[in-house]
């Protein structure tokens, strides 16, 4: 099979190689997928660059956790009826060496969701990391994988980003009143397309604007820039409200401890690799259903061939508009 891989970390154009390698075969409880599209995420680009300082967990890494395609083989213990099914996969390179930047990829059966015929494989390929994070940012808060947000007011900070758009879509489907904030005027339409009822421009007047429209405050906030927005968020939230955050603009950061205490605010920190298997599967199923029922998904900036994987990584690093995908077939 043809695959992209790296054996050392560094700049994309210096460490990523594309070659023929030995086919990966499904182990017990796994399926082999003929990958059509591979999603490219910021976290995977940072892994390749060693932004987090973790180093190489494996001697050889085929990057990317998200993808879509058709099941071509099954491992021991998996029903043969899965062969030929159209699926999305997630977590392919989460605590595993070989991801979806290859013609073939193997994942546990628990890491796939069957897709309806009308679901676009390009959209399905990018639902893993951003989609599951967005879903969890809405549904965290209780012991169940789906939290009842019906009629709650939810503010999604960074509503123009991939996670933000998914969070908006999932919040809307849960029955919430959904507000979005964006930093660029051009992203107002993006957040509205995802399903936001109202979109604000994120600036020093955001607090006043939200409280003008919702004087009692909001129930829950999804946060992409924790350090920058924590003070404003505390003042926007209702008593007993909550924050779900998956990123920060500053690390380490400080928090307004007593205001959080006096308002009984719950703060949830979200690391998508370590969500429970049940939460991931529920999220992937809901995302696939949303796509099948007409949600447009995430705007795609450019689709690259496997040989241009370095360009796809640079697309993410340079913050080009729209998502980046690899097309394998």
Image (cartoon, rainbow, N blue to C red):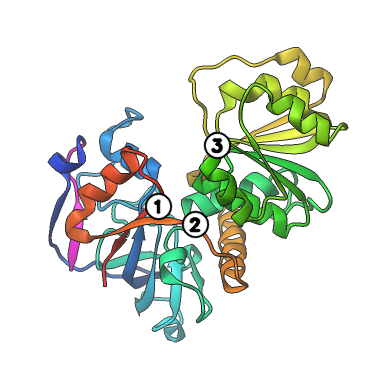
6 in the magenta segment: yes
Which of 77 and 177 lies nearest the eye of the viewer?
Answer: 177
Residue 215's disc number: none
Q: Which residue is mark 1?
A: 323
What is the CA distance from the residue labelled 1 to the residue labelled 3?
19 Å
What is the CA distance from the residue labelled 3 to the residue labelled 2?
18 Å
Q: Which residue is mark 3?
A: 246
State the SS at label 2.
Answer: loop
Q: Are marks 3 and 2 in contact (CB under 8 Å)?
A: no
Sequence-first tag of 3 and 2: 3
Q: Which residue sits at x=53%, y=46%?
A: 163
Residue 298's disc number: 2
State which quadrant residue 266 falls in. top right
Which of 166 and 255 lies nearest the eye of the viewer?
Answer: 166
Characterize the local packing of mark 3: few (<14), some (14-19) or many (20 or more) Cα atoms within 10 angstroms. many
Q: Which residues are magenta?
A: 1-9
Characterize the local packing of mark 1: few (<14), some (14-19) or many (20 or more) Cα atoms within 10 angstroms. many
Report whether residue 61 is seen.
no
Instruction: Pinpoint residue 286: horizontal percent, then vertical percent.
Output: 62, 64
Sequence-first tag of 1 and 3: 3
């Amino acid at each position: 099979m043809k695959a992209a891989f790296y054996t050392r970390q560094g700049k994309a154009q210096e460490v990523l190689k594309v070659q023929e390698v030995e086919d990966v075969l499904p182990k017990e409880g796994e399926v082999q997928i003929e990958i059509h599209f591979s999603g490219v995420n910021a976290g995977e680009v940072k892994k390749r660059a060693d932004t987090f300082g973790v180093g190489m967990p494996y001697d050889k890494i085929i990057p990317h956790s998200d993808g879509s395609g058709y099941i071509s083989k099954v491992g021991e213990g998996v029903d043969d009826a899965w062969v030929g099914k159209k699926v999305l996969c997630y977590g392919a390179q989460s605590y595993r060496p070989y991801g979806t930047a290859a013609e073939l990829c193997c994942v546990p059966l628990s890491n796939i969701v069957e897709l309806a015929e009308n679901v676009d494989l390009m959209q399905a390929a990018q639902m893993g990391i951003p989609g599951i994070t967005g879903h969890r940012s809405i549904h965290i808060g209780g012991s169940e994988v789906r939290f009842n947000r019906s009629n709650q007011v939810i503010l999604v900070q960074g509503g123009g980003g991939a996670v933000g758009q998914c969070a908006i879509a999932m919040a809307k489907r849960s029955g919430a009143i959904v507000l979005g904030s964006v930093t660029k005027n051009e992203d107002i339409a993006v957040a509205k397309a995802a399903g936001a009822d109202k979109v604000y421009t994120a600036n020093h007047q955001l607090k006043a604007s939200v409280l003008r429209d919702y004087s009692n405050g909001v129930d829950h906030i999804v946060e992409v820039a924790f350090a920058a927005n924590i003070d404003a968020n505390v003042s926007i939230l209702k008593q007993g409200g909550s924050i779900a955050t998956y990123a920060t603009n500053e690390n380490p950061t400080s928090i307004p401890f007593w205001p959080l205490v006096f308002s009984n605010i719950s703060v949830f920190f979200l690391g998508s690799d370590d969500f429970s298997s049940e939460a991931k599967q529920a999220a992937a199923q809901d995302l696939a259903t949303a796509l099948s029922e007409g949600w447009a998904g995430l705007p795609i900036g450019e689709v690259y061939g496997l040989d241009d994987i370095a360009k796809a990584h640079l697309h993410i690093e340079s913050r080009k508009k729209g998502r980046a995908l690899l097309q394998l077939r």
